[in-house]
Amino acid sequence: MDHSPAKFVLLLMAAAATWSSVFPVADARSAHAVAAGCIPRERDALLAFKHGVNDTEDDLVSWHEGNQDCCRWEGVTCDNATGHVVELDLGWWTSFLVGQISPSLLSPEHLESLDLAYTGLCDHAHRLPELLGSFKNLRHVDLSDTLCHGEAPPQLGNLSKLEYLDLSVPAITQERDLKDISWLTRLPLLSYLDLSCLDLSSVVDWPLVVSMIPSLEYLDLSNCSLPSAARSLPHLYTTNLKYLDLSRNYFGHPVASCWFWNITSLEYLHLSNTNLHGPLPDALGNMTSLQWLDLSNMGNRTTMTVELGNLCDLGTLRLDRSLSSGNITEFLEKLPKCWSNRLQELTLKSNNMFGKLMNSMGQLNNLTMLDLSHNNITGTIPIGIDKCSYLWHYDLSYNHLIGAIPSWLGNCTRLWYLSLSNNLLTGHIPHGFASCAALLTLDISDNHLSGAIPPGLGNCTNLGQLYLSSNHLTGHVPSKIGMLGHLFDLDLSNNNLDGMITEEHLLGLKNLEHMDLSHNSFSGPLPSHFGSRLLVELSLSYNYFSGPIPKYICQLEFLLVLELSYNSLEGELPRCSHESSLVYLLLSNNNFSGKFPSSARNYSRLAFLDLSRNNFYGTLPSWIVELVNLKYLQLSHNLLHGDIPSTVTNLYCLRHLNLAKNIISGVIPCSLSKLTAMTQANSTKHGTHKSCRSNNYGVMKNEVLLVVMKRQELKYGIIGFFDVLSIDLSLDNLVGRIPEELTSLNGLLNLNLSWNHLSGQIPAEIGAMKSIESLDLSRNNLYDDIPASLSNLTYLSSLDLSYNNFTGRIPLGNQLDTIYSENPSIYAGNIGLCGPPLERNCSGNNGLEHVNQQKSEKVYELLLSFYFGLGSGFVAGLWVVFCTLLFNKTWRVSYFRLFDKLYDNAYVFVVVIWRMINFKETTS
Ligand SMILES: *[C@@H]1O[C@H](CO)[C@@H](O)[C@H](O)[C@H]1NC(C)=O
Ligand SMILES: *[C@@H]1O[C@H](CO)[C@@H](O)[C@H](O)[C@H]1NC(C)=O
Ligand SMILES: *[C@@H]1O[C@H](CO)[C@@H](O)[C@H](O)[C@H]1NC(C)=O
Ligand SMILES: *[C@@H]1O[C@H](CO)[C@@H](O)[C@H](O)[C@H]1NC(C)=O
Ligand SMILES: *[C@@H]1O[C@H](CO)[C@@H](O)[C@H](O)[C@H]1NC(C)=O
Ligand SMILES: *[C@@H]1O[C@H](CO)[C@@H](O)[C@H](O)[C@H]1NC(C)=O
Ligand SMILES: *[C@@H]1O[C@H](CO)[C@@H](O)[C@H](O)[C@H]1NC(C)=O
């Protein structure tokens, strides 16, 4: 895109050069055609040349002695009259030729054009051959993208007839530098010069040199590490310059001090990525020949005060990320107002512009592309560009526009790309998208649009991307959407859409790759067929879908993301017989049941598995180790029982392990140090084991990964997730000790082992877990001293050691003091803890406290049944009562009255007891 005008001009000029070199010859001399073909001496020279070339692809197959007329060899052109070789073209048509150019090449005086572009044809020292300087007749030299080292030979300055010189190198290399370009001033006829991507950083006086090449029309010095363009010149010899490309040089000085603003012949001026700043000079308003002006990516530090009213030929104006700010109303007033408005492309992305769009924009009726995105523009979208028949790209996204989407946009027959996303637009989506057959992308997401999705969108038959997410759309999805056979990206998430999604909606969408319907109110069963086999992402979470997952899922061989969380889906997962490509399988908060799904064994690429808050039962299979790519294993709030299989510790990519609130028993496996992704050395994205990295994270755009830590539920997307390393085994039936090996997981941020039956001591080396921010070991049977190294955990901000049997002095540390002052209950319910911050003296008698302790434990258990009414006995009991009540109206009324009362009493009771305990603690 960026280069197309450059390429175009290049082509034009190349064509012009060929024209001028061919025609005089043809006119004057074609009458005396040379029957004998080429001159033997030159043929021998060419053959000698071929001898030095490694022609692995046989490009020069026509070059052989049997083929006498060397003028017919490919790449060779002779003068029809004299028979001399005048053009040698081994450029882009050949595969990459490598070899040496020997001094024997040709009789120098006749060659006019030499094209060695994209070859490795150099001299014996792998440099650009100096002998080029002796071809006195050369007019056209193309040495672009050659693999030769070293500087361009200054001997090129001897080619006094040179018109075209291209020494550019590929953008990625920039190995060749040029310390002296003064020889260019000896080329009076030079009109085309391309030095792009050469390193000219030491050529301080380049503006003076190029301004002294009188015939120069085309100059490309992009990406040359040029030192500065600030120069005021005594005299300009270049009065014909039409094309100037200085982009991708870091100038960093005021834009007005550049040397070229007086060159009124300029038609193309390319200054993007040059870090120029300050006001654009008034002289710009006098550059009446300008057709193409690119000032984008200057770093938001320029300002526009110039009247551009006289630039009647201006077709393209690019200012993306260039202006520091500005009033869009005033800016548009400065644009050319000539009788024929040629302005076709206007891009002003990310310029902090404010103000309103005027209806006078309608004058810009030849616009093809308008991008005003990422500004602070207010007001409404203006009434039509009178004839929007040329418009193909219209982007007003990321502004503060209000009002409705104007219906004229539906009449722009060539519109390909329409984005109005991230504004404050209201009203309905216009029904009249009648002429939208050309539309490929429609993005009106993140607005306040309401009403239904108009069935007319089904007429936009070429639509590939449809984004209606984050609005207030209501109603059913029209089945006509199902006619969009080219659609590959469909996002309707975060609306209030309802109804069912049926086969009728989907069967026609044969090319669908991404479908996000999450955060709506869709209901009913999932369709048994999705139409497209190409689905990569299927996100249906946060709806009311019910019933089982259709077997069709098994046929989606490219599916990476299956997100069905927060629905009412049930049954077992379909058993797919073959390997699955799934990377994300997120099924939390449904009614799925069955044993831990055995079909997951085929999901060898699975990295994110969330089955939490369902009714999965049975044991955790030891084959889980086969899911070697697992990074996120979230199985909490199910009915899983049995031991934690020790193979879990072989999951060396695992960063998040949550088995909380199951019936898991047994001991914590001790080979935890094998979870190397949880160590500091490996926890950064780059430090991660190579096979743990994957290119497929990008597809996941929603924040769907839940981590419970610091007493809150935090949601992460893929990016944030990588920093949150966590193990949560709380609310299970684990016994035994906390393995010492755990302390080797020094990348872990969250460790929760609360509500188990763990005994023994806290590992003495706990201080080695340097990254820990949240540590919860409460409600276990841990005993003995709290290790002093706990105070080494400098990032710790949440700690709970309550209700264990710890004794001895509490370790001191700044962060521990802060945590305690925020939450004084972190040591509560331990028999023998003493010393500050507690008021209990360490030398004192512990007998009384022991009694208090037992008392408080009782109260505590009572409290529990109020806080966590989840205990199965409690729920079952409640259910019996409730069912009875359902059938007996009078009981029902009196029961709820009673319950109200009970609740009040219970509350009072708890508060009183709680005060009592606190009182006793403070007095003891
Ligand atoms: C030479 O003659 C051939 C055919 O006679 C013609 O196609 C070609 O354009 C001529 N070339 C030049 C350089 O005049
Ligand atoms: C020619 O090129 C081939 C393939 O790049 C290489 O293997 C071979 O060594 C080259 N020969 C010479 C003489 O450079
Ligand atoms: C360029 O224009 C400025 C005024 O804009 C003038 O002072 C300067 O002399 C001009 N330079 C040349 C070389 O014409
Ligand atoms: C623009 O051109 C006009 C007329 O030639 C001249 O008077 C004026 O000084 C020029 N402005 C600048 C800034 O060069
Ligand atoms: C330019 O401004 C835009 C819009 O405020 C901003 O997003 C962008 O980061 C800025 N660019 C620079 C290089 O400051
Ligand atoms: C509008 O642009 C087209 C090219 O797309 C051009 O041919 C035509 O002359 C322009 N119209 C006006 C009024 O400048
Ligand atoms: C922008 O400029 C217009 C015209 O000069 C003016 O009416 C408007 O108040 C300006 N807007 C802001 C926000 O300054």
Image (cartoon, rainbow, N blue to C red):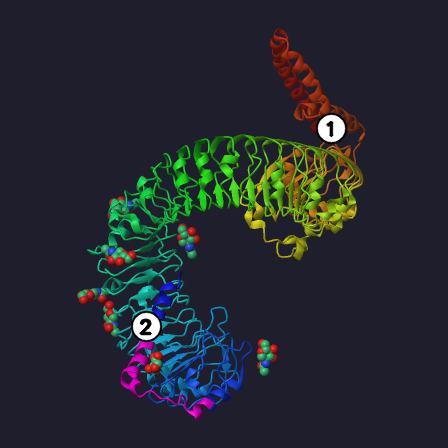
Q: Residues within 10 Å of mark 2 (few under 14, many from 20)?
A: some
Which kind of residue does numbered mark 2 sit on?
Arg
Q: Main secondary structure of the magenta part?
A: helix
Q: Give yes or no for residue 32 being in the magenta stretch.
A: yes
The residue positioned 61% from the left and 8% from the top of the image is 889
Q: Which mark is residue 924?
A: 1
Residue toward you, 710 or 881: 881
Indicate left or right for 563 with 851 as reference.
left
Verify CB contact (< 8 Å) between mark 1 and mark 2. no
Of badges 1 and 2, nearer the viewer stands: 2
**Whether residue 653 can be seen here:** yes
Indicate left or right for 719 with 855 as reference.
left
Magenta residues, start to end: 15-43
Quadrant containing ligand 2 reads bottom right
Say what secondary structure mark 1 lies in: loop
Residue found at the very far bottom of the displayed protein: 41
Quadrant of res 404: top left
Ligand 5 within 8 Å of disc 1? The answer is no
Which kind of residue does numbered mark 1 sit on?
Ser
Quarter of the image with the N terminus in it: bottom left
Q: Give yes or no for residue 307 being in the magenta stretch.
A: no
Q: CA distance from mark 1 to mark 2?
A: 84 Å
Residue toward you, 828 or 676: 676
Q: Which residue is mark 2?
A: 231
Q: Which mark is residue 651?
A: none
In percent of width and height, residue 60 lies at 50, 80
Quadrant of res 912: top right
In percent of width and height, residue 255 lies at 33, 64
Residue toward you, 318 or 902: 318
Q: Relative to 583, is 866 above or below?
A: above
